[in-house]
Amino acid sequence: MSFTRREFGRVALAGAPAIGALLRGDLAAAAAGQAQRPMSQWAGVKIGLNVPYSFGTGNNISAEDLLARVLEVGFGALELRAQPVEHFLGSPTVRAAADAAKAPNAASAARPAAPTAEQKAAIRSWRLSAPSSKVKDFRQMYEKAGVAIDILKVDDLYAMSDEEVDFFFQMARDLGARAVSAELPETRSDTKRIGAFADKHKIFMAYHHHAQPAAAIYEAAFAEARYNGANVDIGHWTATQNESPLPFITKHHDRIPHIHVKDRRLGTKGGENTPFGQGDTAIRPILQAIRDNKWNIRPIIEFEYKVPEGSTRVAEIKKCLDYCREALTS
């Protein structure tokens, strides 16, 4: 696709809803500002997507490139990792990682080494002086395109200083997010420390489990802070606990800002990820319980199964969304 500088300027003035159409090559629709707005809400339940993770692109992607991908698959809600926001704010570290990922030999490059103490200090210094007012510009770009940022996922949260933790909770507030999310910590005292920031900002800290005995850990964390919450991964729960998470969700729905939706087999059957509807995860009854009880829980698709031969990741993500739509409308 090629276009003149004047055409590009006209597209830019059309606003964020044009981005997806522009990058897909539909210049006419983009210039007119008529790119289709995403629709992922049925029966009062809005389905979101975990990004950039679900696209398999790495996390250090620009806000504009990510939005184009989101519009392509048609989601109106997101669990968003913090890197695209920091990229938008001008983080030298994130932008350098994004540039490195585009290098010709990036696919075969070794995993980046953990940052040194000096690099960590530089990252912290940048964060504490970052142009935080631009976070609202990021939010406005996405909301103009019809995309809400419900959850902010922050990597390595427990290794950060208190000032950095506060920075990310304020980022979540400015994005309009209902929660900050991170994996369950290895050190139990971290849930109390981070929970204090959640209570301060009145934004949930949604801890994400894998194979841990999640119910007991969550209930202990709930007692430590009013805004300590659970990001229940219904696929992980099925595969590692060999049971449906619906009873736990029913009991603690007011402490669960979002769930991860994926299909996995029971651990006794192998526990592998499958296309939606082919595993043992109770996706349909869980979505319908959220619908029928009007629980304030955002179902977030986390795409993890192997793309079938002859298909594409984009096509499979759309199939996952269609499965959720059918469950909510039946």
Image: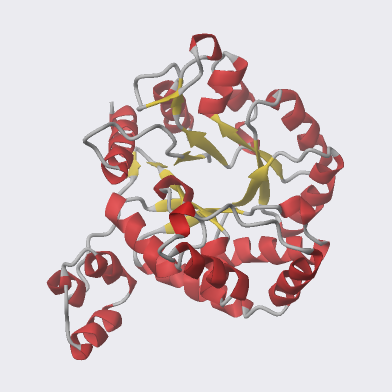
**Residue 41 at x, y percent in the picture:** 35, 44
Q: Quadrant of the C terminus?
A: top left
Report the side of 260 relative to 131 (left or right).
left
Q: Quadrant of the N terminus?
A: bottom left
Asked if residue 86 shows in the view, the reply is: yes
Residue 142 versus residue 243 in the image, above or below? below
**Residue 261 at x, y percent in the picture:** 46, 33
Report the side of 237 relative to 282 (left or right).
right
Query: Which residue is at a point 74% across and 74% down the rendered structure image?
Result: 122
Nearest the eye: 28 or 225: 28
Nearest the eye: 276 or 216: 276
Of all residues, the one furthest to the bottom in this rendering is 6
Residue 37 versus residue 41 in the image, above or below? below
Residue 180 versus residue 239 in the image, above or below? below
Asked if residue 143 shows in the view, the reply is: no
Query: Which residue is at a point 45% across and 68% down the rendered structure image?
Result: 62
Report the side of 224 relative to 323 (left or right).
right
**Residue 320 at x, y percent in the picture:** 33, 35
Of all residues, the one furthest to the top in this rendering is 268
Of all residues, the one furthest to the left in this rendering is 28
Picture quadrant where residue 307 is located: top left
Query: Which residue is at a point 54% across and 9% down the rendered structure image?
Result: 268
**Residue 20 at x, y percent in the picture:** 28, 64
Report the side of 61 relative to 119 (left or right).
left
